[in-house]
Image: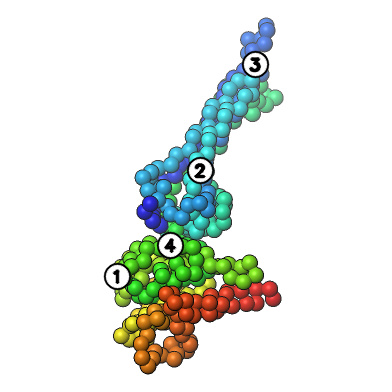
Amino acid sequence: MDFIDEIVIKVKGGRGGDGCVSFRREKYVAKGGPDGGDGGNGGSVILKVDNNISTLFDLKHKKMYKAESGKQGRGKKMHGRNGKDIIINVPKGTLVIDYETGRIIGDLKENEEIFIAAKGGRGGWGNSHFATPSKRTPDYARQGTAGEEKTLKLELKLLADVGLVGLPNAGKSTLLSKVSAARPKISDYPFTTIVPNLGIVKYYDYKSFVIADIPGLIKGAHLGKGLGDRFLRHIERTKILVIMLSSQSADILSEYNVLMKELKEFGHGLDEKPKICVITKGDLIEGPSVLPDRIDGLEPLIISSVTGRGIKELIREIGVKLFEGENG
């Protein structure tokens, strides 16, 4: 299944059913009092979070969602049937944006959370509502109203506690596979990861946290190079960034500066998030180390996803940053 994290759809609520013009039929009375029933309300288009899906792929091939209209009222004050709602399942973390104005109108973060994307129209009143002492036999009813109609942009932003950031082939996917049950595609060539991946990491005292691995960044990522602008938004909601730098890099500090520049240029405060610096592929370090002792004031952790070096320490440091002080 393709990973789709952005889509535009049209939604339309059902029209409300018209009210009914009707009169009681009584023996020896040509026209009794009004008994026209109300029309049914139109159905609504509803977005609902489903934890079992992680992409907007299922919405790819359908661009218009229209709920059922309400039915017309009937005599004997019988109410018309309400139109059926349409439920559209979306992944957790879906933003709902008014396509015309660009305004965010919904942010769906919890399982089974719902958002009424297009409200159905109200059913019209039957003529029984319009009887007065001076007008006992009204011969008119109210029409149902139209349902809302909108064009929406749905944008997925993954919900994760920790974001892995690094250049292509920095070892992000390998680390994710080591610390969680996630099984991202791993290889020795750049851009193996072409979609974001999530993994759940167990911590102490029955705690856990979610890590997001996004495709490697390159210079100009915030402008869309390497699709960086699309994937950077998936770490906007994270609390911590783990900056991953390969021990095999010719210039680790230069690579760090490239990453920080891309985060800053993308905006949304990404460069200001708490960070942990990690130097990966510790098993490939040979001879006297020339690795930096400090990177932007941070002491880097040296890890190896192959041998397990530094992995427990990294998980512990992440956990401390996430959970310290949460009970007071």
Q: CA distance from mark 4 to mark 1?
A: 17 Å
Q: CA distance from mark 3 to mark 4?
A: 70 Å
Mark in the foreground, 1 or 2 = 1
Helix, strand or loop at label 3? It is loop
Q: Nearer the viewer, residue 124 or 289?
A: 289
Establish if 115 lies above or below 74. Answer: below
Query: What kind of residue is marked 1?
Result: Tyr
Q: Are circles 3 and 4 on residues that touch, CB within 8 Å?
A: no
The tag on residue 189 is: 1
- Position in image of residue 198 (x %, y %): 47, 63
Looking at marks 1 and 2 on the same chain, the residue that comes earlier in the sequence is marked by 2
Which residue is at a point 44% across and 44% down the rendered structure image?
11
Which residue is at a point 42% across and 75% down the rendered structure image?
306
Packing grade of label 2 (10 A; few <14, some 14-19, many >=20) is: some
Looking at marks 4 and 2 on the same chain, the residue that comes earlier in the sequence is marked by 2
Query: What kind of residue is marked 2?
Result: Ile
Q: CA distance from mark 4 to mark 2?
A: 31 Å
The residue labelled by disc 3 is 24
